Image (tube, rainbow, N blue to C red):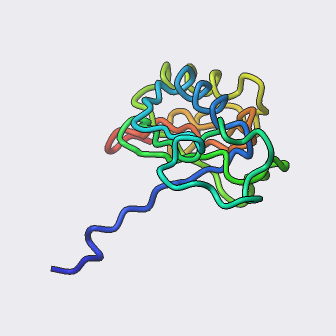
Amino acid sequence: MSTQNNRIVQPYLFFNGKCEEAVEFYRKALGAEVEMMMRFKDSPEPTPPGMLPAGFENKIMHCSLRIGQTTVMASDGCSAGEVKFEGFSLSISVPNEADADRVFAALADGGRVEMPLTKTFWSPRFGMVQDRFGIGWMVIVMAASGQK
């Protein structure tokens, strides 16, 4: 059996010092569940000197979140610089228009609407938003089979 069938691609987001704030935001906005969280100070191996900015010992070294059926991993990373999430968006599929409205509004809180929720030829409700951390999201209601 080929190992190619066992591959999983998962997003890993680096928040440069704002990971804990992001985790709380996604818990409230999306019902994300924290599966695992480790701070730099709790690492079984010490961080090499000079690798982290001062005060990062309480920051998140690694976190695993479950959003629906997807695992999203996150960290504060090793920098306190500005974060730029460019060239990708996360797509979240929801079962109905009411869920789309709720999720979209939650993600837009403190963020920026790129494309308001609307009916499209591929979905009864689709919209794009950038959340307060700069992550692009596409919220979509999957069209029922045969529906246009």
Instruction: Tell me where residue 21 sits by quadrant.
Output: top right
Question: What residue lies at 47% left-to-right and 30% top-to-bottom?
Answer: 32
Residue 13 in the image: state x and y as whole percent. 61, 50
Relative to 97, is 19 on the left or the right? right
Q: Which of the image's four quarters has the N terminus?
A: bottom left
Instruction: Tell me where residue 78 sits by quadrant.
Output: bottom right
Relative to 56, is 36 on the left or the right? left
Residue 41 to residue 14: above or below: above
Question: What residue lies at 77% left-to-right and 52% top-to-bottom?
Answer: 79
Front-lying residue, 117 or 130: 130
Front-lying residue, 37 or 140: 37
Find the residue positioned furthest to the right.
Answer: 82
Residue 128 to residue 85: above or below: above
Residue 97 in the image: state x and y as whole percent. 49, 24
Front-lying residue, 58 or 66: 58
Instruction: Tell me where residue 102 sits by quadrant.
Output: top right
Question: What residue lies at 43% left-to-right and 29% top-to-bottom?
Answer: 33
Residue 111 in the image: state x and y as whole percent. 77, 30
Q: Which of the image's four quarters has the C terminus?
A: top left
Residue 129 in the image: state x and y as whole percent. 70, 37
Relative to 85, is 2 on the left or the right? left
